[in-house]
């Protein structure tokens, strides 16, 4: 499936949106572009805040764009730093990608193209909530 993805177009979209990032504190700009299974490209950039913990990762913006433009699942993702180099999403963002993609969703990383399953092994997701929702009182 990786051969079917226009990685150059996806990377260009990530670089273009990275240039719009708001990073006056860290000066570490991040852009991300996701190819949806229906063919559209969604993007996001990081937005910092003087209250550091309130800042938004680029993936947060992209996930918001996914839902604002019709939902669906990610087929591929490219995340770049301020030098247009591949950047591995943080753990929190890997979880966001997991819930908006599939285990087989492809991601461009500093080590090459990997799947979400590769970068978030043994992931916790919505199915875990359903499977574990049954009331089971601890008998310890």
Image (tube, grey):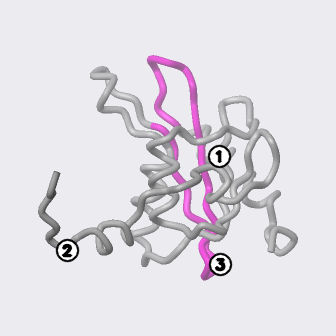
* N-term-proximal mark, 3 vs 2: 3
| 77 lies left or right of 52 | right
Q: Are marks 1 and 2 in contact (CB under 8 Å)?
A: no
| 81 lies left or right of 45 | right
Query: Of circles 1 and 2, which is in front?
Result: 2
| 130 lies left or right of 113 | left
**What residue did someone put label 3 on?**
39
* N-term-proximal mark, 1 vs 3: 3
Q: Which mark is residue 38?
A: none
- Dividing the picture into quadrants, the one containing residue 114 is bottom right
State which region is magenta: 21-46
Query: Of circles 3 and 2, which is in front?
Result: 2
> Residue drawn 59% across and 43% down?
31
Q: Is residue 78 magenta?
A: no
Q: Are marks 1 and 3 in contact (CB under 8 Å)?
A: no
User: How far is the residue under mark 1 from the one under mark 3?
Assistant: 18 Å
At label 2, counting other C-alpha atoms closer than 10 Å, the crowd grade (few under 14, some 14-19, many 20 or more) is few
**What residue did someone put label 2 on?**
134
Determine the secondary structure under disc 1: strand
Q: Position of residue 85 (x, y in %)?
A: 76, 36
- Observer-nearest of 100 and 103: 103
Q: Position of residue 26 (x, y in %)?
A: 50, 18
- Looking at the figure, which quarter contains the N terminus? bottom right
**What residue did someone put label 1 on?**
79
User: How far is the residue under mark 3 from the one under mark 2?
Assistant: 38 Å
Most extreme residue toward the front, as rendered? Answer: 140
- Observer-nearest of 135 and 98: 135
> Residue drawn 59% across and 53% down?
121
* N-term-proximal mark, 1 vs 2: 1
Q: Position of residue 42 (x, y in %)?
A: 55, 63
């Amino acid at each position: 499936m990786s051969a079917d993805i226009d990685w150059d177009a996806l990377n260009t979209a990530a670089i273009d949106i990275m240039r719009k990032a708001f990073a006056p504190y860290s000066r570490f700009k991040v852009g991300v572009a996701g190819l949806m299974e229906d063919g559209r490209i969604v993007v996001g950039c990081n937005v910092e805040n003087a209250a550091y913990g309130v800042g938004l990762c680029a993936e947060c913006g992209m996930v918001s764009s996914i839902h604002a433009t019709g939902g669906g699942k990610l087929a591929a993702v490219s995340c770049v730093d301020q030098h247009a180099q591949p950047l591995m999403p943080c753990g929190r963002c890997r979880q966001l990608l997991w819930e908006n993609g599939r285990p087989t969703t492809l991601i461009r990383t500093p080590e090459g193209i990997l799947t979400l399953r590769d970068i978030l092994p043994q992931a916790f997701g919505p199915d875990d909530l359903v499977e574990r929702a049954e009331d089971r009182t601890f008998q310890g």
